[in-house]
Image (cartoon, rainbow, N blue to C red):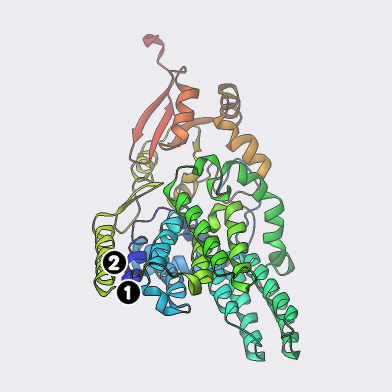
Amino acid sequence: MRWALFLFALSFTAFAVQSGDALMYLALANDFILTGEWRQIDPYLYSLPGGTLVWWHEYLSYLIFYGAWWTLGYAGLTLVKVLVLSAMFYVALNSEPRARNGGALWIALFMLAILAGSFRYIERSSMFSDLFTLGLAATLLKTTRPSRKFFLGLAGFFWLWIQLHPGFVAGLIFLGVWCLWELYHSRVTREFYWLALTPAALLLNPLGFEGALYPFQFAFNEARTLKLYNFEWMPAYHPAFRFAPETLAFWILSLASLILLLRARALKTLGAVFALIAFALSAQTVRFVPWSSLLLLICIKPYAELTRVRLDRPWLRRGIAILLFAVAAKNLTFGYMSSSGQRLPRLGLDPKFFPSTTIEFLKQRPIPGRLYNSHDFGSALVWNGIRPIFHHGFVTDMQFYKGDVMGALGTRERFLELADKYGWTMLLVDKFNGYREMHRILSPIPEWKIVAEDEAAYLIYKMPDPPHAR
C-alpha cells in the first residue's frame, strides 16, 4: 500500500514548469554566481536604478536548478521538484507506525494532505525549506536524550539549510519547542551544550549575521505588504481561497486531526504541540500548507484508525490500492485540474504561464519606448534577454511595489501618470489577472492596441492613429 500511496502523491508533481521564479534562478546563477559577480545591485530594472537585489540568501538553490537545467533543459527543473517532493512524501510514509499506511482512515487523510499541498507543487526554492522543516520535525518527534553526534549533525543541517533558503525560522521554532519539552521532562543532559553550534552554523553564509537575520527582517517588513497582494503570503482563511479545493482539503484535514487527538486524549503530547504549530503557521500563511499538511499526518498517525468500523478487509485494501493506481495513472497520462488551472504531464514550460510567443514577437518587432510587464513575467523576460524591465518578483522595495506595481492596476489616472513617468509604449499583460484590470483602464483609449497574444499573455502597443485616419 505504501507504494500505491507514494505513486498517487508523485502523480500530482509531474507536470510542466509553472513557476516564473525558476527562470530567475537560472538568470541569477548565470549572471552572478557563475561569473563571480557577487554584488547586490539590481541590473534588471529601469524603474529602480541602483536598487538592491537580494539573492545571496539562497544561492545554492539557484546552482541546483541551474545544474539541472544545464543537464536536462527545462525537464531538469521538473526533476528537481519531483525529487524534493518525493523525499517529503517518503518522510510521511516512513513515519511510525508504518502499519497505518494500510489503514483506510490514514489513506483518506493522506489523500487530503496531497490535495491540500498540491497548489504549491511548483519549482520554487522554498520547497527545500518545506522538506527540511518536515524532516526536522519528524526527526525531533522520535528523538529523546540525543547524543553529541546528533547535535553536530543538527548544526550541519542548519548550515546547509541557510545556503538553500531562508525558511529555517520554522525549523528553529520546532527545535526550540522540542528543547523546552525535553527540559520540562527532565531529559536535558550535558550534551545539549552542543546545541550552541546551531546558531553559530547559521552565521556561516555569504551575508554572515545579516543573512541569519534576513528572514526575521523580511517577516516584519516585506511580508506584511505581500500578505495584502500576493496569494502565497495570504492566510488560508482569505476569501480568495474560500472555495478552493486545496484549501477545503486543508481545513478538513486540520479538523480531522483535532478530532483524532481529542479522541485519543493526546493533546498533551509533543506531536499535538507540533500539529498546533503547523496548523497555526499555515492558517496564517498559505504557502506553508505543503509541509504542514504532511506534518499533521505524521503527528496523528499513531491515532489514525477506525475503532468501531472495520475496514481492513483484504478485498477493500486491494480496491483502495487499485483506486490509488488508477488516479495516479490518470494524472500521469491526462493531468489534473488545480485551482491554478489544468496541469498537464509534459516536460518544458507550461505555455499558460510563460508568454513565449509574445516574447518572440517583442524581440522581433519592438517599438520605441519602454515595456511594462505583469508581475509574473519579469523573470521570463530577464531570462530571455529582454532587459531592463519594469518589475520582477525579487523586488524588495515595498513602496515601489505598492505605489507603482500595484498602482498601475488601480485607476486610469494613476496608470497614465505612471505610463508618462516611465515612458511605457508596450505592455506585456497576463491573461489571468492583469488583463482584466488593463482592459478596464485602457478600453476607452483607442491608441492602445493588442498586437500579439498567446496562451499566457497579451502584448499591447501604444499606436496612435495616423493623421489621415482621424
- Give x and y (percent) for residue 444: 46, 17
Disc with the residue nearer the chain's start (1 vs 2): 1
**Amino acid under disc 2:** Ile
Q: Does 433 sit left or right of 60 as displayed?
A: left
- Residue 187's quadrant in the figure? bottom right
Residue corresponding to mark 2: 320
If the image is split into quadrants, where does the N terminus sit? bottom left
Residue corresponding to mark 1: 1
In front: 164, or 287?
287
Q: Residues within 10 Å of mark 2 (few under 14, many from 20)?
A: some
**SS assignment at label 1:** loop
- Give x and y (percent) for residue 225: 65, 44
Q: Is residue 112 above or below residue 459?
A: below
- Give x and y (percent) for residue 25: 50, 59
Q: Is residue 366 above or below residue 211?
A: above
Q: Does 69 sit left or right of 46 as displayed?
A: left
- Residue 334's quadrant in the figure? bottom left
**Amino acid under disc 1:** Met
Residue 122 appears in the figure: no
**SS assignment at label 2:** helix
Rounded to the nearest angstrom, the CA distance separating label 1 from label 2 is 9 Å
In front: 160, or 460?
160
